[in-house]
Every structure is written in C-alpha cells, then in structure tokens.
C-alpha cells in the first residue's frame, strides 16, 4: 500500500482522497462532531455561529475539504522545497492517517481551522532564505501568526517557531525582527482599539491567551496509551531515516527541517499549557509528525515493515473511531 503513495504522479492525490474515505468511513454513519466552546479564540465563535447550524452532510464536506486541502498543500510544499530526495505523497498519507488516530481529531474544531493557517505560515517561512523582499514576507508571517493566535490561543507557541526560523534562516538584522514583531501584534492592536472605541474594554482580557497548566486528560485510557505508543514507535525509524538523509542535503533544506523539528517540539506543550482545550489542542502535532513519518514511508527499501505500520494504523483508527469514540 505504501508504494501507491511513493509515486510523484498526481494519481497520488486520488489515492489520498480514497484513503480519507477509508480513514473516516465512520462519517457515513455519524456526522462530524463540533467541539464544545473553550473560550480560546474567534475560530470557536465562527464555528458555533455559522458552522454548527449546518446539516450533517455539509459538516462532512467541510471537514473533508479542510483535511484534504491541508494534506495536499503541505505535501506539495515539502516537495516543492525539495525536503525529500524524491517526491511522493507519503507526508499527505501520514497526515490523513493521523487525523483519524483520536476521536477528538475527527471533530470540527478551532484547531482544525488553525492547521490551515499554520501550514500557510510554514510555506512562507521556508521562502525566507535569500528572499529579495524579506520585510514584506516577515510582516505577512507576523500578521498571519497574530491572527492565528488571536483566533485559537493554543497556537501561541508559534511565536517561538517564527522567531527561531528568522534566527537560523537569515543573518541578524534588528529592522527585520522589528517588522516581524509589528506584524505579530498588529491584529491585537486592531481588536483592542475596536473594543476601546466601542466601550468594551472589559473584553480585552478575553482576546489574550488564558493559560491553564495541567494534564489534559482526566485519566488516560488504555487505548489512548496504545495509540501514543504507536506514534512514538513509528517516530523512531522515521527520525533515523530523516537523520540519514538530511545530512546529504544543502544547508537551506536542513534549516527548513529544523523549523519542522522546532514546530514539533514547541507544539507538544500546547495541550499542557491549555489543558481546558484537551487533546483537540494536540491536532497541531499532525503537521510536523506527518513530515517526519514521511521519511520512513518514503525511504525504507524493504516495504513490508512500513506496510505493517500502515495496516496497524488503520486498525487503531477503526477501533478509536468506531468503538472508543462511541464510549
């Protein structure tokens, strides 16, 4: 099965769509669930007011379109940036598989919308190297990041990612750092100014991230532990194959991979810094994890073990969505 996604032919997009239908076949029985509000940004207001009243089939279409566009766009961005020694659709495959791993990741949530913007930010960050107009690009990165954080507070960790990217990709220039910072705070300035003008200064606190340090689960379930164990087990060979090939790449591509690695490291803290958002806040993990998993599915010469991981993933997805998700 993995070989179907190793080809650089556009038929891989068709296979991604078919894989999505298999991973989320449970939607043909139960429509996507909309997560309950946690007061973590404007995306929740948008979902509750405009998405929740829609009929079930439109909820299915919205979730399907968002996930497929995210998987395809991220996959093509990695290919276009030559972050793999051969093009394929294994990162898109891993992305779609991961969306079905936990019941919370199959919900329509603010985190689902946020991933679209995080991928957009990543695409812009990998264009920083030797860019002829870095200030314009940096302001746009800061602006999109500020809007994303304003719309979904657990993405506050993006601040570390974008400043780290600027640090390693370009030589230090105070003006560029200032432009990035201005773009980052500009959305907050606009919203705060609007609230001030309309005599709603009491609501300014609501646009700021509300940290809640705690374990995101009341009591980790047995199957959740198995799912996390599977991810950790798959990450080991993926990281090995990544190290094996990244050292052969040019410095620009190595720096792009460092951005992915830092995104993974800082996003791990999201569910713990915003415990009230639960495992929904961990949806951001899918982006960097799918990039690393793609290395193993793409580079492994003997495909029987990657295929085994693929079928085990489908078994876990079937259990977690058809059985665990009903509890």
Image (cartoon, helix red, strand yellow):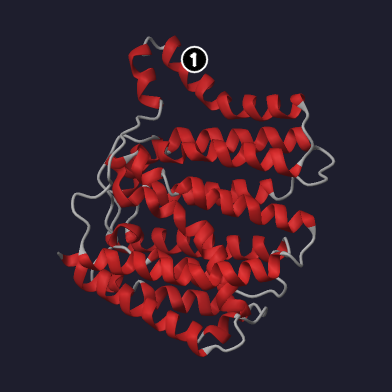
Residue 101 seen: no
Q: Tag 1: Cα neighbours inside 10 Å, few (<14), some, or many (≥20)?
A: some
Q: Residue at x 25, y 45 (%)?
A: 36
Residue 176 seen: yes
> Which of these two is toward me, 29 or 318?
318
Residue 159 higher or lower than 270, as above or below: above
Residue 56 higher or lower than 263, as above or below: below
Position of residue 302 measured from the top left corner of the image (x, y, whole percent) = 57, 89
Residue 216 higher or lower than 55, as above or below: above
| Res 86 quadrant in image | bottom right
> Which of these two is toward me, 165 or 93?
165
> Which of these two is toward me, 240 or 68?
240
Position of 71 with respect to 323 (left or right) is right
Position of residue 294 measured from the top left corner of the image (x, y, whole percent) = 57, 71
* Quarter the C terminus occupies: bottom left
Q: Residue at x 64, y 77 (%)?
A: 10
| Res 56 quadrant in image | bottom left
Residue 205 higher or lower than 32, as above or below: above
> Which of these two is toward me, 95 or 213?
213
Position of residue 315 measured from the top left corner of the image (x, y, whole percent) = 32, 80
Position of residue 174 measured from the top left corner of the image (x, y, whole percent) = 75, 25
Q: Residue at x 68, y 32 (%)?
A: 139
Secondary structure found at label 1: helix
Q: In this figure, which residue is indicated by the disc labeled 1?
A: 193
């Amino acid at each position: 099965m993995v070989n179907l996604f190793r080809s650089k032919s556009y038929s891989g997009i068709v296979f991604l769509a078919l894989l999505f239908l298999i991973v989320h076949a449970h939607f043909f029985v139960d429509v996507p669930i909309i997560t309950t509000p946690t007061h973590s940004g404007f995306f929740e207001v948008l979902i509750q007011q405009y998405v929740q009243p829609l009929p079930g089939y439109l909820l299915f279409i919205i979730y399907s379109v968002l996930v497929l566009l995210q998987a395809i766009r991220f996959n093509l961005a990695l290919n276009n940036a030559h972050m793999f020694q051969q093009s394929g659709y294994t990162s898109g495959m891993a992305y779609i598989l991961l969306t079905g791993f936990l019941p919370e990741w199959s919900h329509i949530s603010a985190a689902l919308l946020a991933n679209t913007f995080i991928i957009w930010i990543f695409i812009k960050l990998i264009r920083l190297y030797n860019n002829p107009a870095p200030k314009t690009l940096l302001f746009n990165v800061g602006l999109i990041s500020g809007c994303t954080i304003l719309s979904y507070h657990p993405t506050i960790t993006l601040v570390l990612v974008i400043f780290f990217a600027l640090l390693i990709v370009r030589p230090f220039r105070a003006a560029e750092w200032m432009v990035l910072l201005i773009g980052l705070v500009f959305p907050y300035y606009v919203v705060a100014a609007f609230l001030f003008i309309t005599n709603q200064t009491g609501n300014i606190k609501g646009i700021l991230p509300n940290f809640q340090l705690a374990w995101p689960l009341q009591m980790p379930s047995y199957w959740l532990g198995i799912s996390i164990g599977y991810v950790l087990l798959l990450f080991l060979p993926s990281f090995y194959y990544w190290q094996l090939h990244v050292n052969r790449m040019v410095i620009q591509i190595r720096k792009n991979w460092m951005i992915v690695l830092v995104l993974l490291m800082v996003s791990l803290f999201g569910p713990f810094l915003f415990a009230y958002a639960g495992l929904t806040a961990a949806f951001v993990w899918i982006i960097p994890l799918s990039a690393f998993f793609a290395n193993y599915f793409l580079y492994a010469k003997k495909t029987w073990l990657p295929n085994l991981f693929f079928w085990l993933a489908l078994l876990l997805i079937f259990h977690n969505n058809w059985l665990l998700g009903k509890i």
